[in-house]
Image (tube, rainbow, N blue to C red):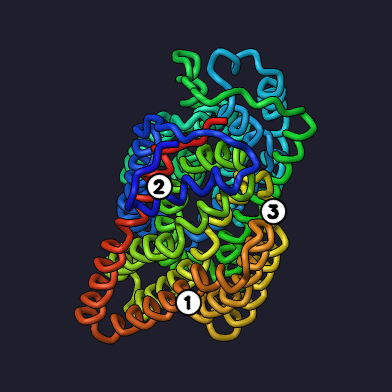
Amino acid sequence: MNVIRGDSGVEDIVEIVAESPLKGDIKTKPRGRLKQSIAINAIVGVSSLCVALVVFPRYTIALGLDRFGIILVGLAVSTIAINLDIGMGAVISRRAAYIGSAHFASDHSAKKAAARLRIIAIMPAIILAVYGSLSGIWDVGGYFAVISLALFGGYIPVACRSAQARYEGAGEFFVPRAFILISSVIRILVAFSITHVTESLQIAVVLVAECSVIWIPAVGCAIALKRSTLEVTDSPLHEGWTSLSVYGAGSCLSAMVGALVLNVDTLVVGAILAPSAVVIFAAGSRVIQVYRQVIGWVMQPLLSRLTSIHSKSGNGGLRVVWRGFHPLAIFAFSGVGFAILAMGLLLIPVLLPNSSPADVNDARQVLILLCGGAIISAAHQIGLLVLAAARQPHSLVTSQLAWAALRAILGAGLGLKFGVVAAGVGILIATVIVEPSYLVRISRILEMGRYEIFRRAGLPAVLLCVTIVGFGYLALYNLYIGLVLIFLCCGVLILVSALYLRRLSLISEWSIDV
């Protein structure tokens, strides 16, 4: 066994073997692919903020707050609907993470899942068509807008998902993320040229452009896959179709509820307030979406590595990995959150160019409150990844449903009476109430003490949430002092998070061979 003395990270990885019932040695593996995937995902996540700076204000001017607000609600519904793939995308990703390129083309389970996706894709398309026909999308965009939402926001992304799932499961994130950058260029071009489009087609064109972030990668990966061969170096994993289907259904349910949690706010605000209020709320929530994209896409390449650790070391290995990541992961996520908050406070006036100072102030308060909630929810982010690797992605569905319901109830109740900022307060309160249930469930599955998991993840998240909300509101009264304190905290957290990045390096460098 090869051990580097004096480095606690390596000793933690060695402990994975000690806790596992399996015996084996630790060997080094090339770590370039994982680091490259993490870097690419982070760059694409940050580029989303840059695109929003161009697209958001252009549409508020060209379309008006009401029409653009209706589009934002439609996109939120599309984000939820595209997760209705019955888990076939997750099945393909799981197979790609385990079998080599020589086996994948003839893999029965992967081919069956890909064939079913083309049929399953009809379901989200029908849902979006019905929604578009009964909502304001028909009123402002007519037949073409409804068809565009159903086709490009539902059918195409799901029907062509198999190729993208194969790339991501194999750890080849460069290809799908490159197509996301192409979609960003298309979105910017459409935003600048939308005023030259006939008014009756404007809504349809905007929907196609904004949905390009999901349908262009799917179509592009399908084309690219025919011109290249994936290289997957992990050993084959023999799982039956029933086992894979159960895993896929759990992944689908978890992803569906997760999408509902992240988009229920926009749906609630659109239901209880005017469409113009949706734009004000979205100005803050879009900035938080960038935070979630950066964190989610940086973590996503780790899933295949954690899955490999679980297959060889069981929950004991994942338990040690979780301990290795905490509380450093909370510091890293919070450092990103502080940076996003500072940029958001400066950029919200750009996102709402023709709005009153009161609307800009409301959007900033929404951003601060949502940022506080994002820091609280960071306590379970690594846990979600660990549970997915342990083939239990559905185990937190109860907590997710409770979170979505509380966000809707508190957000709607307070927002209806006190306005859009109160809706943000309700969302933050719901997050604080539900988060302990996430941590308790994770502690049970990983067989860890509740005190330990709250001390390593819950307590740091609460302290940093109070700090970021306090400094954010201070910035509303004195922007200069508030931003200085926010950037100072950001710098300190990023320095501390260098240890977290070292953990990522170790996870990519070391693996267990049985």
Q: Is residue 388 left or right of residue 204?
A: right
Q: Nearer the viewer, mark 3 or mark 1?
A: 1
Q: Earlier in the sequence, mark 3 or mark 1?
A: 3
Badge 2 marks a residue whose secondary structure is helix
Residue at 32% x, 47% y: name it. Answer: 47
For disc 3, the marked residue is 134
For disc 1, the marked residue is 462
Residue nearest the observer in this picture, 120 or 133: 120
Q: Is residue 384 left or right of residue 59?
A: right
Residue type highlighted by circle 1: Val
Image quadrant in which you'd find residue 163: top right
Q: CA distance from mark 3 to mark 2?
A: 57 Å
Residue at 33% x, 56% y: name it. Answer: 499
Residue nearest the observer in this picture, 219 or 13: 13
Find residue 135 and report its horizontal and vertical position in percent: 65, 56
Q: Which mark is residue 10?
A: 2
Q: Is residue 110 left or right of residue 228?
A: right
Badge 3 marks a residue whose secondary structure is helix
Find residue 103 and report its horizontal and vertical position in percent: 60, 15
Q: Where, quadrant-wise, is the C terminus in this rendering? A: top right
Residue type highlighted by circle 3: Leu
Position of 37 relative to 461 (above/below) = above
Residue at 41% x, 67% y: name it. Answer: 284
Q: Which mark is residue 397?
A: none
Residue density around tag 3, few if under 14, some if 14–19, many if 20 or more, within 10 Å: few
Find residue 443 and report its horizontal and vertical position in percent: 64, 63
Residue nearest the observer in this picture, 448 or 155: 448
